[in-house]
Amino acid sequence: MSESELPGAPDLAYRDGALSLEQVPVARIAEQVGTPFYAYSSAHLERRYREFTVAFGGKAMLCFAVKALSNVAVLRHLGRLGAGADLVSEGELRRALAAGIPPSRIIFSGIGKTETELRAALAADLHQINVESAPELSLLSDLAQRMGKTARVAIRINPDVAADTHAKISTGKAGSKFGIDLVHAADSFRRAKQLPGIEPVGAAVHIGSQITSLAPLEAAFGRVVDVYKAMRGEGIKLTRLDLGGGLGIRYRHETPPSINAYAAMVTRLTRGLDASLSFEQGRWICGNAGILVSRVLYIKDGATRRFVIVDAAMNDLVRPAMYEAWHEIVPAIAPAAKAKRAPADVVGPVCETGDIFATERELPPVAAGDLVALLSAGAYGAIMSSEYNSRLLVPEVIVRGTEFATVRPRPTYEDMLAREKLPPWL
Ligand SMILES: *Cc1c(COP(=O)(O)O)cnc(C)c1O
């Protein structure tokens, strides 16, 4: 793989033979932070945010999907650039507010918002609450009345379009748990208009994640635009279209649509519609901004296979085990041009057969003690990490130019144990 091909380029590259995020060699971070750790490029996050907003001529609001990468430092960085936030829980609301993202740029999504969460959303006067069921709409109306608030509501429509992505991240087909079915959408808007405390402001859609062709998005948006027009025709004064996230990125050989092609498609579908547009991209913004750096512990030559055992595991990055996801794996020191590649299984220390990052991967020579990086790990990486096997939660670092800062330190074993309490009888 040539330098320019690294996902994350140009912010991730070999500089003088050292794998570097912006101007910081990952080995330098490893010296200070230890391994494993996640590192994110500020420049990459900014590059993606700007590319997106420029593609829409500065007229669309990008509400970063916090669930893709929720570290407060990342949220503050994006928020200062002008990004809003798309949330799926009160915890994420707390994070967005702690990051300084104004409520006027926050959208609350999710099919199972609790009463407490809806109250928190109303109290914060969020830009928009995306409602996903009839009972949620009723509850929100009750709460808003009691609190003397008006909820600005978008109805999330399930457009019955298959996203052509991994089954576990497809959300827009009839029968999925997300959104209000197309056949019930119009009634939901009519009810929203009648209910006290509710102001229907728009229609929302999100059909899944890591979508690498425009066709399913276009089909879904077309259906939502039809509903939007029909509702306006009935005198329901909708003014907003929330077209969700889901744009795919390159992990390996994927060829996702360019952001300009995506913007052109949306602009064509929404021309003359009198709707302000918002988006909820997560992965597209942060996926290739982050890497997971790990150290090789052992090389084990099995009878039939060679194993590269690293100090990161499925509890730190679950995507390969959960979604059969591919992450490029590269050494921290540039391999020699004629270095011979050989197949190996890259595995972690966790006691699960599924704790495998790569199977039969053609790798340049690596030895015990070497650093390797798993690329494209910015989205759905650190946020899905756990302490399974009582491994300490993986730290996070953010890089800016020649400097870096730890934005989630590695806890100590004392921290880990202090969270637990014994019952009085033991
Ligand atoms: C997960 C999610 C997103 C973000 O998806 P990406 O694929 O990361 O862009 C956006 N909107 C909603 C409602 C989501 O659940």
Image (spheres, rainbow, N blue to C red):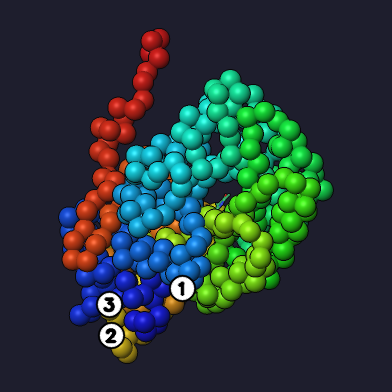
Helix or strand or loop: what does disc 3 sit on?
strand
- Of badges 3 and 2, nearer the viewer stands 3
First in sequence: mark 1 or mark 3? 3
* Quarter occupied by residue 422: top left
The residue lying at 63 percent from left, 59 percent from top is 274
Q: Position of residue 181 (x, y in %)?
A: 76, 47
Compared across the picture, whether 399 is left or right of 207 comes to: left
Residue 314 bears which disc, if any?
none
Residue that badge 1 annotates: 361
The residue lying at 36 percent from left, 25 percent from top is 420
Residue 336 bears which disc, if any?
2
**Amino acid, disc 3:** Tyr
The residue lying at 49 percent from left, 35 percent from top is 125
Q: CA distance from mark 1 to mark 3?
A: 21 Å
* Quarter occupied by residue 112: top right
**Number of on-image labels:** 3
Q: Residues within 10 Å of mark 2 (few under 14, many from 20)?
A: few
Residue closest to the far bottom: 338
Residue that badge 3 annotates: 14
The residue lying at 50 percent from left, 62 percent from top is 59
Helix or strand or loop: what does disc 1 sit on?
strand
Residue closest to the far front: 235
Q: Position of residue 25 (x, y in %)?
A: 22, 68
Compared across the picture, whether 149 is left or right of 9 comes to: right
Name the quarter where the N terminus is drawn. Answer: bottom left
**Amino acid, disc 2:** Ala
First in sequence: mark 1 or mark 2? 2
Helix or strand or loop: what does disc 2 sit on?
loop
Residue 221 in sight:
yes
Image: 311 above or below 54: above
